[in-house]
Amino acid sequence: MNKVNLILHAHLPYVRHVEYPKFLEENWLFESLNETYIPLLIMLDRMDKDSVPYHISICFSPTLLTMLTDEALQERFVNYMNERIELGEKEVRRTEGEDTECHEMAKRYLGYARMSLETFESYERNILTGFKNLADRNRIELLTTAATHAYLPLYKDYPTAINAQVVMGLRTHKRVFGQSAKGFWLPECGYFPGLDKVLASHGVSWCQLAAHSVISARDKSVYGGYKPVELPAGVVGFARDWDLTSLVWSGTFGYPCDSDYRDFYRDIGYSLPLDYIRPYIHEPEVRCFTGYKYHAITGKTEDKNFYDPAKAAEKVSLHVDNFLYSIKRKGIMLEASGISDPVFNLCFDAELFGHRWFEGIEFLEGVLRGAASSPDYELVTPTAIILQDGEKEKLAVNESSWGIGGYSDTWLDGSNAWIYRHIRKAIDRMQDLTHRFPDQGSLKGRFLNQASRELLLAMSSDWPCIMHDNTSVTYAEKRLRNHLGSFNVVYSSMSRNTVNTEWLINAERRNIIFPDIDYNLFDPDKTGEF
């Protein structure tokens, strides 16, 4: 029996900017809601109603949870969707008669947009209720991650910072879902020896690992990551299967690269005349994705074929069959080498499905339905595997990540190394503040809590990753400077034993994340060494 442990990680950086009428980066949230989170919920709920015995694990990051439960952003998403619906109605009229291929897709997109908004409203604008219902029905396991998705190996010399990231991740999850998370998604699969001790001290049962952390362990792995790994502190690690996930994840040969699938980049927001598209992009004339895309990937050419949904559906069916076959084939190979009932740990960013890979939700549904209906597979969650108390091996695994090169290259290179001397200086100063002003209440306590909030936001792995990828670099640098600048406002004021009340109120309104934070988390005397 091949145990399939599928884990999706839903995460976005904190991009709440309600001080502006519209903000471009908030579209990251709205696009993911419309194209991934809501369709995923619809699909999982449909399978539950069909009594498909599926199991899957999903992590929602604390930054994403905060945005999904924020009434201001919920209202802005409704406005965003009403714009998409209005654009869809215009597109249906524009493409009628001449552009037959575009017309059919325009009608589809309009239908998707209406369904998405209707579903959003049916959950009273909080789709997390739907995922919580599925968790209560034992269809999914919900887990958490670090507070602001910090890449933890680069902070291993700062136990207080690691501890704060773990504590606030767990605390936010419990506040939103009403129950503690047993699993902890390591941001970017970033592990270092000793991190398991922190996780164990806060009741975490399991985490995921990069495959080479197990393969390269000093003590040779007997199972090569195809059985759970018990880390020194007792936390159970599940090593991601690189080969199988690459069938989906690879940007060169993965399924989403198929020429018949829809092209992500060819969007009418960049091609139609400004006079037509202006109401649906950003002022003054900043073009952006609208979600209305009519072309297939085709190949490395500007001359793209029109998207054919029937051809794409055929490819989805083929890729589902190929993926399940690849799991079964690998299981046979492992059994021949003495590893029976292997656990295949398949870890993905959720936003790949539906958003980046338009057909991805359909693919996921095919895999889950196919595995659930076959005696060759068992869909499992990490906690269920632990409760089964099957074979596992004790290993002290190595530092690793799933980034380029397998270690920290993405988050520490020539494009972003400069940020760490500033963040580490801020951590030192935060620790200093906890010693000089312990257990403060009222305004001083709020002021110090805001400092710790800004520091955690500065630690987000998204900022160095954006710099490394050379995408929204200006925005990432601005966010980092703003958070560190805000931290220094508190530090400078408290060094004079004063509180800037007006600044504090504005800062709290701007960054509503972690309402239950306690700056004393950064007290070194209350945080042990690794």
Image (cartoon, rainbow, N blue to C red):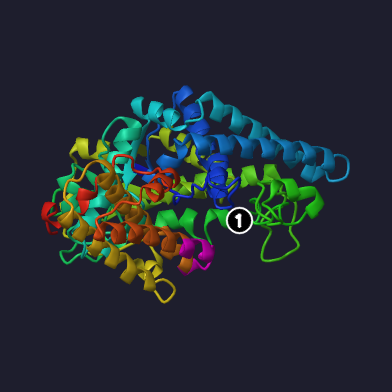
Q: Residue at x 52, y 31 (%)?
A: 42
The chief SS type of the magenta part is: helix
Residue 435: name its quadrant: bottom left
Asked if the stretch drawn in magenta spans residue 276, the answer is no
* 112 to 473, vertically: above or below: above
Question: Left of 96 or right of it: where is 343?
Answer: left
**Amino acid identity at mark 1:** Asp
Question: Left of 522 or right of it: where is 312?
Answer: right
Residue 302: name its quadrant: bottom right
The stretch of residues the image draws in magenta is 468-478
Image x and y of residue 105, in percent: 73, 41
User: Can see residue 186?
Assistant: no
Q: Report crowding for label 1: few under 14, some 14 to 19, many 20 or more residues within 10 A (C-alpha).
A: some
Image x and y of residue 179, in percent: 28, 31
What residue is pinned by disc 1?
Answer: 258
- Give the SS element for disc 1: loop
* Front-most of residues 212 and 167: 167
Q: Residue at x 28, y 66 (%)?
A: 424
